[in-house]
Image: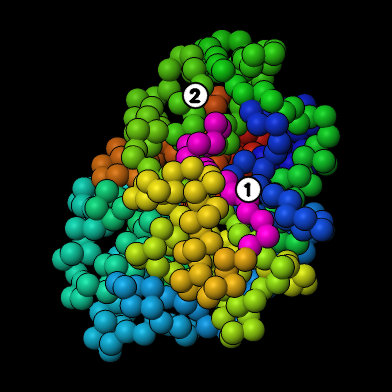
Amino acid sequence: MAARELRRQGEDSLVVLEARDRVGGRTLNMPIGDGHIVEVGGEWIGPGQDAVAALIQELGIEAYDHYYRGDTTYDIEGKVSRGLLPDVSFSEALDFAKVAWQLDRLSAKLPLGEPWRAKNAAALDQQTFGAWLSQHAATSFTPAVFRLINRAVWSGYPERTSLLWILHYLRSAGGLLPVILNDGGAQDQRIEGGSQVISQRMAANLGDRVLLGRPVLRIEDPSSGPTRVVTAQETFTADRVIVAMAPADTMRIDFAPGLPEQRLALASGWARLPRLPLVKAAVLYDAPFWRVDGLNGAMQSDRSPIQLVFDNSPEDASMGVLSCFLSIVECPHLADRAAREEGLKHELARYFGAKALDAKGYVEKDWATDPWSTGCITPLTPGLLTAGGEHLRKPSGRIHWAGTESAKVWCGYMDGAISAGARAAAEVIASLR
């Protein structure tokens, strides 16, 4: 996105260095037959995500509504129910609503994109989300649901996650509801052709300015002379450099001179964080059979190895696809791909019936083993955001930072990645003119 914006502003002397043999970063389309794909990385867009909405319109890419007609299946604290909402008591529903309101109230007080500037930032950053939930929840149901959200959406545990980071994430999305709502929330629509097509279309427009298989080994930013970017194949000189990746992944690059202490502390701290091995898998069927039973294919569980399930069938329903988010850290029996393929079918059969056993295919992406991404989304532990957060976007000499983690709005989403790239490009243009 940064390169696209630079070219739009008349800066045409540029190159994009991509470590992978493909573009798309943490978006990835996998073919599933008959010309269809399924997304095994970032996927959805929703209301309020103006940056991605504007970009796909420019690129001539369509979006369509995700399928949510019918009942959602819930398995919370061992109780399986189906409906618009889980089957809970009035006191449980009231408690969850109260805690959700308190979270939104706290997050709304944060300076947008700059949570470390809040008056009580240090106190919020020293407390874990889990400890805060223990103090404010009156039922076991509320922490169970937020533990599910923490694991499935943020790939972490409440007892290890900074409360300030949670509030910052919610503030950037406009509150809790946009994050957790499917229909009408952040999971509202899918991209025609799959989300990776956005990067593929931009790369096609950039042509031979995009170089694949070019992991950057070293960036030299001397006090005099041009900046040098070193890969295994060649060295480039530049007036400015934009690094668009997760902060943890910048630890793969040797910077000379070294990065500012706060930036280094943030990136290295992020890289050292314990993370849940997150797998996004898709189980393939001849048809979306669950729809006949009045189910929308969505499932949420705090007990199953699968935290979330979505109906990711093609728009024409010519085949059935159940996409699953699962963490294998607590399930050693699902440690290898073959075991997951078989285990997921049996787990899905618990919620959607015996037909779930009759799958015709399986694809997955284990983001914990990706050589170029340190997981997909990783929450910060206490203390890191206040220690180095202001360096998420602050240029380090002639090096500028992008990536969805640096976004002020919708951080952690495709929309945030797009706006962060545009912001970094604007910084470069301002510095050169």
Q: Nearer the viewer, residue 81 or 251?
A: 81
The image quarter in which residue 285 lies? bottom right
Magenta span contains residue 177: no
Provide the residue span drawn in magenta.
Answer: 359-379
Q: Position of residue 392 (x, y in %)?
A: 44, 39
Q: Secondary structure at mark 2?
A: helix
Picture colour scheme = rainbow
Q: Is residue 234 above or below residue 424?
A: above
The label shown at residue 252 is 2
As drawn, which residue projects farthest toward the bottom?
90
Q: Position of residue 123 (x, y in %)?
A: 20, 51
The image quarter in which residue 106 lies? bottom left
Amino acid beneath label 1: Thr
Q: Position of residue 312 (x, y in %)?
A: 64, 65
Q: Nearer the viewer, residue 383 or 87?
A: 87
Question: What's the residue at 20%, 76% (across, down)?
Answer: 139
In the figure, is residue 111 to the left or right of 57? Answer: left
Q: Earlier in the sequence, mark 1 or mark 2?
A: 1
Question: What's the residue at 53%, 45% (across, down)?
Answer: 337
Question: What's the residue at 46%, 14% (across, down)?
Answer: 257
Dot 2 crowding, Cα within 10 Å, few <14, some 14–19, many 20+: few
In which quadrant of the rendered image does the N terminus lie?
A: top right
Kindly report the distance in space between the C-alpha atoms of the residues bearing marks 1 and 2.
Answer: 20 Å
Magenta span contains residue 366: yes
In the figure, is residue 226 to the left or right of 106? Answer: right
Q: Which residue is mark 1?
A: 27
Q: Nearer the viewer, residue 154 or 345?
A: 345
